[in-house]
Image (tube, rainbow, N blue to C red):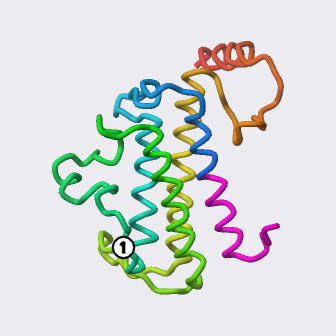
Amino acid sequence: MTDLTDAKDALRYYLQEARESLLWKLDGLSERELRMPRTPTGTNLLGIVKHAANVEIGYFGDTFGRPWPTPQERVSDAEVDADPQADWYATERESAAGIVDLYRRVWAFADATIEVLPLDAPGRVPWWRNGEVTLGRVLVHVLTDLARHAGHADILRESIDGAAGLVADSSNLPDQDWPLYVQKLTALAERF
């Protein structure tokens, strides 16, 4: 059982919860559905996971002097220079299973950093103007970023097949007539 009164344990717990929430949004969808752009800026479910993996590699690796063991798996600076969105979509050579596997291995890598360092351990984010940070600040930053992207994934997945909620086996949404609810909100909005 996690001690949620301990700051580090609480941060780790909620980081893992956000990771798992993000990944369940991929469950049961085809490779095409996972890659399909769902917004005018091309946001897609598989791209969100690829981005999250690269974010955690950078913040829990580079920031604390821990290089990712297989650099060819991460999006390189050269790839980002050529395409600023390179970490937001899967290439033809990448598969959904491969990106999910990468992300799960990134969890172990990031968790090892979190495990061995205290929250006040210093680090340096090379891509920030004033990059001096602590592990605690990085944990909060990554958790905030990941929660935001998990929210994006919530909306994308709901728009595909209606699957919604925090976890796969419990939607945490009230049992109600959703079309009727949407109709009610639409009628309210149309008054303005």
Q: Quadrant of residue 69?
A: bottom left
Q: Secondary structure at mark 1?
A: loop
Q: Is residue 165 left or right of residue 121?
A: right
Number of marks present in the image shown: 1
State the quadrant of the N terminus: bottom right
Closest to the observer: 43 or 103? 103
Q: Is residue 39 left or right of residue 126?
A: right
Q: Is residue 42 left or right of residue 10?
A: left
Residue 18 is situated, as x and y percent measured from the top left of the image, at 62, 52
Up-down relation of residue 2 to residue 76 (above or below): below
Residue annotated with mark 1 = 67
Q: Quadrant of residue 41?
A: top left
Task: Tell me the amino acid under the disc marked 1.
Answer: Pro
Q: Which residues are magenta?
A: 1-18
Closest to the observer: 16 or 187? 16
Residue 90 is situated, as x and y percent measured from the top left of the image, at 35, 39
- Residue at (55% x, 35% y) in the render: 26
Residue 9 is situated, as x and y percent measured from the top left of the image, at 70, 72
Question: Badge 1 local density, few (<14 within 10 Å), some, or many (20+)?
Answer: some
- Residue at (55% x, 83% y) in the render: 117
Up-down relation of residue 178 to residue 75 (above or below): above
- Residue at (62% x, 15% y) in the render: 191
The chief SS type of the magenta part is helix
- Residue at (81% x, 21% y) in the render: 176
Q: Quadrant of residue 3?
A: bottom right
11 is within the stretch colored magenta: yes
Up-down relation of residue 172 to residue 76 (above or below): above
Q: Is residue 28 left or right of residue 13?
A: left
